Image: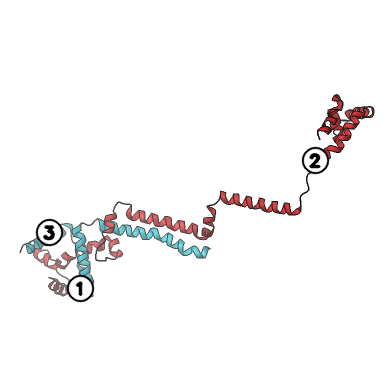
Chain colours: A red, B cyan
Amino acid sequence: MTERLKELESACKDYEEDLVLHYYGENSEADGKRVAEHLAACGRCRLFVDDLRRLLPQMAKSEEMPQSFWDSYYRETVAKLAEQEERKFWWRSWLVPAQGWLVPAFGTAGVVVLVIGLLFGKGNLDSFMERSPVKIPQEILVDSNQLEFFKSMDILESLDHLEQQDGTKSQPNSTTHTDRTRYYRGVA
Amino acid sequence: MKTRNSPVLVFALCLPLIAGRASAADDNWRNLSPKEKDRVQRNYQRWQSLPPRDKEHLREEWNRWQTLPQDQRDRLKQRYDDQRRDRRRD
């Protein structure tokens, strides 16, 4: 190969570049004519062009690989790309089975957190925990009027009697008076 | 998918309502003094064992009590408290 390159160097210095372009057919028309005239007269440059014709195709020639090589190459490339992709989005594999219920689950969890926040957020965890030993229904706890009723129940039981003592007792309703008297006697 | 998530969605929408209701109940209960809480619990327990006729009577008394003027109610409350105190002293 070194010998060959030496032979290439033996072309006329002024024409060396133009000869390569001539070989590839990339000279302008005028240059092509000039180089052709020079080639007709110069044996060294003719040999140089012959060497180019002989050597350059060999240099550009690639080794023919068997089909099995390309098949294996393709498989390896695909596997490497998949591995790289998987490494990049490793967390997605956790989400794939959960995609169906992930959004509603997160929504529900959010609402539950909100509810817990509402219940405990007022800094009254103690009072929340301090539930009554007697289970009072929510309907009563929600209704302040009902709570007031149970708070005043003692007085209501003695209301008749208290009013009589106070001297403010209005003429009792005839239908309920007996009941009241009977009830008062019952609880007093 | 839509159908499968519907109960979850309904539950999620109802939760704030339930929480709001629970929160209101808590507020009412929290605002009571320990003595008042004790009285409410005791009276509620007693109320549950009362015959319907007595319950009705108490409801009537409650309606009447609410129509009484404020000064009269204060007076009657005061009298009731005094009598209880006296009873305890005896």
Left or right, A86 with reference to A158: right
Query: What residue does disc 1 label?
Result: B54
* Residue A37 sits in quarter: top right
Which chain does the numbered disc 1 sit on?
B
The x, y position of residue B43, in whole percent, is 20, 66
Q: Amino acid at mark 2?
A: Ala
Q: Amino acid at mark 3?
A: Gln
Residue A187 visible in the displayed image: yes
Q: Work out whether disc 2 and disc 3 sit on a shared chain.
A: no
Query: What residue does disc 2 label?
Result: A60
* Residue B13 sits in quarter: bottom left
Mark 3 element type? helix
Residue furthest front in the image: A3
Question: Label 3, label 1: how many angstroms apart (C-alpha)?
Answer: 25 Å
In the depicted structure, whether residue B74 falls above or below residue A45: below
A5 vs A134, nearest the viewer = A5
Residue furthest top in the image: A14
Residue B67 visible in the displayed image: no
Numbered label attached to residue A156: none
